[in-house]
């Protein structure tokens, strides 16, 4: 099995990690971004700026799709249902799909439409900020993790993805237990992303404020308890490592806070909403994540002008 071409849907904070390198490594004719309508027009006419360089990638609409060897889904949770429909023409008999979104349920949603025979588990760790319409990040400051659910021995398709990432100089790692890795990332995201979004503070607060750190710890503890009910062991050592991880960009703002700053709908359903829903199903109390969920919903309502004087 060899990957010769790739398609990407979602040219945002996660997608820009892949797109320049895939085009450079595979060649322009072997890589495309999936988009239609106004978004396609914008990408073709204005491109996207990544680390100071403007790129105009080849763009294909959902109707123009032909099967890709590798298909990467890097959309926001709010766009996943549409993306699942839009990739249909790009999924062939041997297509490998990576859904690099945050959260712990996106693989299941994509597999429900296309089958687990196409899916690998994946997640990303890369701090990206959108400033004045341009994306900035350290190309070597993060990675994508991928693999089968368990990777004691690497499957043929995992080896194929590894080979194309080597070819395209995309930093990666392959976890022996990808499900555990997904949940570790999710636990950290809940603690950091939700705390900063609710309080309106950058990552710096998680290093210096005992109060922000207390909220972070309580939110992560609920994730540990929910995961434990599912047979996924997030140890106290893992939680402590997440509590004390180095903050390399202290004034950066996590994705949910960036969405609120931009007055966009957030991915709160995928984050705290998932913890609350699973907690109710499994008999785990999740009061901190309920506060995250309802508090950030209020901030969304505020951004929508619900509490402006002219609407009273």
Image (spheres, grey):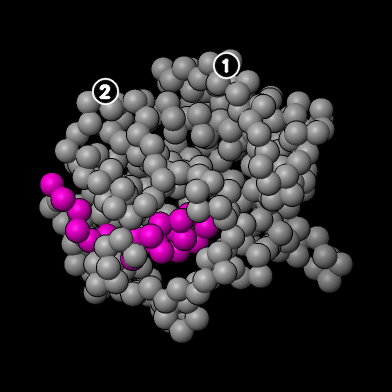
Residue placed under numbered mark 2 in the picture:
152
Counting from the top left corner in percent of width and height, residue 305 is at 75, 65
Q: Does residue 305 sit above or below 301 in this rendering?
A: below
Note whether residue 42 is visible.
yes
Note whether residue 280 is visible.
no
Looking at the rendered structure, the secondary structure element under dot 1 is helix
Counting from the top left corner in percent of width and height, residue 172 is at 39, 42
| Magenta residue check for 14 | yes
Looking at the rendered structure, the secondary structure element under dot 2 is loop
Which range of residues does the magenta coloring cover? 1-23
Q: Does residue 291 sit above or below 170 in this rendering?
A: above
Q: Which mark is residue 154?
A: none
Horizontally, is 236 left or right of 87 in the view? Answer: right
| Magenta residue check for 4 | yes
Q: Does residue 265 sit above or below 172 in this rendering?
A: below
Residue that appears at 67% across and 27% down: 244
Camera-side residue of 195 and 6: 6
Counting from the top left corner in percent of width and height, residue 67 is at 18, 62
């Amino acid at each position: 099995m060899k990957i010769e071409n790739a398609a990407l849907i979602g040219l945002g904070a996660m997608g820009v990690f892949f797109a320049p390198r895939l085009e450079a490594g595979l060649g322009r004719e072997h890589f495309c971004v999936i988009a239609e309508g106004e978004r396609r027009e914008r990408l073709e006419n204005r491109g996207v700026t990544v680390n100071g360089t403007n790129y105009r990638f080849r763009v294909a609409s959902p109707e123009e799709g032909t099967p890709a060897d590798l298909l990467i889904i890097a959309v926001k949770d709010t766009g996943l249902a549409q993306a699942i429909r839009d990739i249909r023409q790009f999924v062939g008999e041997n297509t490998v799909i990576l859904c690099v979104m945050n959260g712990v349920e996106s693989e299941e949603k994509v597999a429900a439409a296309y089958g687990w025979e196409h899916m690998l588990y994946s997640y990303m760790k890369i701090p990206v900020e959108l400033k004045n319409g341009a994306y900035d990040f350290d190309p070597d400051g993060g990675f994508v993790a991928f693999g089968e659910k368990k990777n004691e021995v690497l499957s043929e398709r995992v080896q194929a993805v590894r080979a194309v990432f080597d070819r395209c100089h995309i930093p990666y790692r392959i976890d022996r237990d990808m499900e555990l890795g997904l949940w570790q990332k999710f636990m950290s995201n809940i603690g950091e992303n939700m705390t900063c979004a609710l309080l309106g503070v950058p990552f710096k607060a998680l290093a210096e404020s005992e109060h922000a750190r207390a909220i972070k710890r309580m939110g992560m503890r609920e994730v540990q308890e929910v995961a434990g009910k599912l047979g996924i062991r997030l140890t106290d050592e893992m939680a402590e490592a997440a509590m004390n991880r180095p903050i390399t960009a202290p004034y950066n703002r996590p994705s949910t806070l960036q969405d609120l700053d931009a007055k966009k709908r957030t991915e709160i359903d995928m984050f705290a909403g998932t913890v609350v829903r699973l907690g109710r199903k499994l008999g785990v109390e999740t009061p901190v994540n309920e506060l995250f969920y309802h508090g950030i919903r209020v901030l969304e309502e505020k951004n929508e002008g619900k509490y402006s004087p002219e609407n009273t």
